[in-house]
Image (cartoon, rainbow, N blue to C red):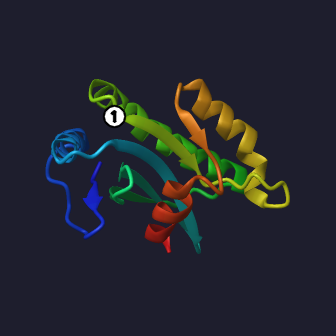
Amino acid sequence: MTWKKFSGEIIQSSILEEIERAIIRETENGYKLKVCIGTDSQVKGLVTDFATVIVLLREHHGGFMYIHQEKNTQQVSIKERMLMEVQKSIETAYSICDLLDIYDVALEVHADINTNPSFKSNKALNDAMGYILSMGFIFKAKPEAFASSTCADKMVH
């Protein structure tokens, strides 16, 4: 799986090694960190572009992110697509959660799903929330889910 920085620079090592180096660097610089993971997608014709982000927030000092993008040609309903986004976020969170535990870094999984029932994405809210919480992760939906609805969204638009 290829990850890159916001600048476009491709991460040459594993994302786990990159995150660990970042945690060590940032905590040595005196920052308290939190990690937020989210995925967004955009349908473009017959192709759906997915972007998953790992956002490292420095408490009161901004943050930075790592991005993984992939394309899918499978045609699915809006609910299925929302749950595919959540699955990608959970897989990413699961792959780094042990490392975050070692360094005592908080983790949230953000879902690009609206809590307002008048939005189409709301159909997936209960399933997404149950999926994320059942995996033991902290769940955030819109408007608090900035990792998916702002950061990942920027990458697919």
**Observer able to see residue 90:** yes
Provide residue 89's location: percent of width, then percent of height: 48, 44
**28 horizontally vs 38: left or right:** left
Q: Amino acid at mark 1?
A: Ile
Say if 67 sits above or below 32 in the image: below
Circle 1 sits in a helix, a strand or a loop, which is it? helix
Say if 59 sits above or below 71 in the image: above
**116 horizontally vs 139: left or right:** right
Provide residue 17's location: percent of width, then percent of height: 18, 40
**Quadrant in the picture for residue 143:** bottom right
Label 1 neighbourhood size at 10 Å, few (<14), some (14-19), many (20+)? some
Tell me what residue is drawn at x 54 percent, y 61 percent: 41
**129 horizontally vs 18: left or right:** right
Instruction: Judge by depth and name the residue closer to the eye, 17 or 84.
Output: 17
Q: Which residue is mark 1?
A: 96
Tell me what residue is drawn at x 36 percent, y 60 percent: 62
**Observer able to see residue 77:** no
Provide residue 136's location: percent of width, then percent of height: 53, 25
Tell me what residue is drawn at x 79 percent, y 61 percent: 119
Tell me what residue is drawn at x 28 percent, y 54 percent: 3
Question: Farthest right residue?
Answer: 118
